[in-house]
């Protein structure tokens, strides 16, 4: 029997059970939405631009919210991943500082900069220094439940962001798309969960095809770029496996040229195309053509389609598949999916300098 189907062995491979966190992800979104039903944050009426600042697992929620709401936004939204904020920051900016631990130095630094500039600030965190200084300065804090790896708290962070942006008048109420997402992900869970054998489980068979390869994830710039980055990050952090990503059409103007050398390395790359029915017709054609050009060179070429109606549900359906693929790839790599020791080591070396 395949290791992916030997669910008893998963306890040894995955002692902190990333598997349970993934399998309860629809409920994480549902419970977060229930608890934020009556969220009110009073903000000034003249917000001119929006900056979501954070790093890694705490920044990706900002990218996904941006992708899912771009057609609805009337002001610019950028996701900032650095110590410093862009020069357009002013007292009419809204900064949402997201840090699961509340101790990420880049996020703390950008919080302080926004505070000095008199920007309106909202914090999303489970505690740490960010919560302490936000409370000292009277900045609203939307709390996250503690005790999770930051990347596994995505559902809570996403709902908090959508709720906050609705509350300050930047977004319409997203309850409809959130409910659709919860229902769709509950259905997909039955398909992707560990108890569903590999023969019927697309997440397991995708992981099997990608095993032993560097993974390249390509999505459209309009809807799937953030999802491609989530796949890449989850494959890196959960499976401890190198991956990269790019977006079409931009990829057709540079990276495509690189699909020539070194040939033996190209044969070790597994490509995943993330497709969405909402993509521009010319982007759809670009996917077909790109596939045709790299198919014979790559080690594997796979394609997945988003599911659902709303853009949020389509994005999150594709995120959910990628999260399961990264889990099963971790099992195949014999890697414990939860710890990210090198990130912890890096942070401790930096703070002791
Ligand atoms: O997945 C991780 O652990 C990292 O990507 C963290 O999210 C990142 O280092 C930022 O930390 P935090 O989410 O606590 O702000």
Image: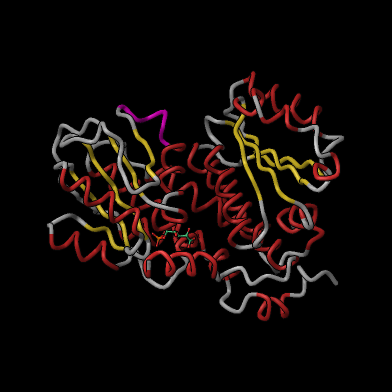
- Measured as percent of width and height from the top left, residue 189 is found at 61, 59
Image quadrant where residue 351 sits: bottom left
- For this rendering, which residue is in front, 289 or 258? 258
Left or right: residue 317 versus residue 136 is right
- Position of the C terminus, as image quadrant, is bottom left
- Position of the N terminus, as image quadrant, is bottom right
Main SS of the magenta part reads helix
- Measured as percent of width and height from the top left, residue 125 is found at 32, 61
Q: Residue at x 31, y 44 (%)?
A: 84
- Measured as percent of width and height from the top left, residue 290 is found at 74, 28
> Residue 70 magenta-drawn?
yes
* Residue 285, placed above or below residue 318: above
Image quadrant where residue 276 sits: top right
* Residue 104, placed above or below residue 41: below
Stretch in magenta: 69-74
Q: Residue at x 23, y 40 (%)?
A: 94
- Measured as percent of width and height from the top left, residue 80 is found at 37, 42
Left or right: residue 203 versus residue 64 is right
- For this rendering, which residue is in front, 317 or 290? 290
Quadrant in which ligand 1 is drawn:
bottom left
């Amino acid at each position: 029997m395949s290791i992916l189907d030997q669910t008893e062995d998963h306890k040894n491979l995955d002692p902190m059970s990333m598997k349970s966190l993934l399998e309860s992800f629809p409920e994480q979104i549902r419970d977060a939405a229930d608890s934020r039903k009556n969220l009110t944050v009073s903000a000034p009426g003249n917000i001119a631009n929006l900056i979501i600042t954070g790093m890694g697992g705490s920044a990706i929620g900002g990218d996904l919210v941006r992708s899912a709401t771009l057609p609805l936004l009337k002001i610019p939204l950028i996701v900032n991943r650095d110590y410093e904020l862009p020069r357009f920051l002013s007292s009419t900016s809204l900064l949402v500082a997201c840090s699961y631990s509340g101790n990420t130095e880049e996020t703390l630094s950008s919080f302080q900069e926004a505070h000095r500039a008199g920007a309106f600030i909202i914090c999303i965190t489970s505690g740490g220094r960010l919560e302490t200084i936000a409370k000292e300065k009277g900045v609203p804090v939307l709390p996250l439940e503690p005790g999770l790896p930051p990347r596994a708290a995505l559902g809570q962070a996403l709902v908090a962001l959508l709720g906050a942006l609705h509350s300050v008048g930047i977004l319409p109420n997203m309850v409809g798309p959130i409910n659709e997402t919860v229902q769709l992900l509950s259905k997909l869970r039955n398909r992707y969960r560990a108890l569903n054998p590999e023969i019927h489980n697309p997440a397991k068979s995708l992981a099997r095809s990608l095993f032993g390869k560097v993974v390249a994830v390509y999505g459209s710039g309009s809807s799937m770029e953030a999802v491609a980055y989530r796949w890449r990050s989850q494959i890196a952090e959960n499976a401890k496996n190198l991956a990269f990503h790019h977006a079409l059409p931009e990829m057709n103007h540079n990276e495509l040229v690189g699909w020539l050398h070194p040939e033996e390395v190209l044969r070790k790359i597994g490509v995943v195309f993330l497709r969405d029915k909402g993509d521009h017709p010319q982007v759809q054609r670009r996917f077909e053509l790109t596939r045709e050009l790299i198919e014979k060179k790559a080690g594997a070429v796979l394609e997945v389609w988003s599911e659902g109606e709303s853009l949020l549900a389509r994005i999150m359906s594709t995120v959910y598949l990628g999260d399961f693929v990264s889990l099963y790839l971790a099992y195949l790599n014999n890697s414990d999916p939860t710890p990210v020791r090198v990130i912890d080591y890096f942070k401790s070396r930096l703070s002791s300098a």
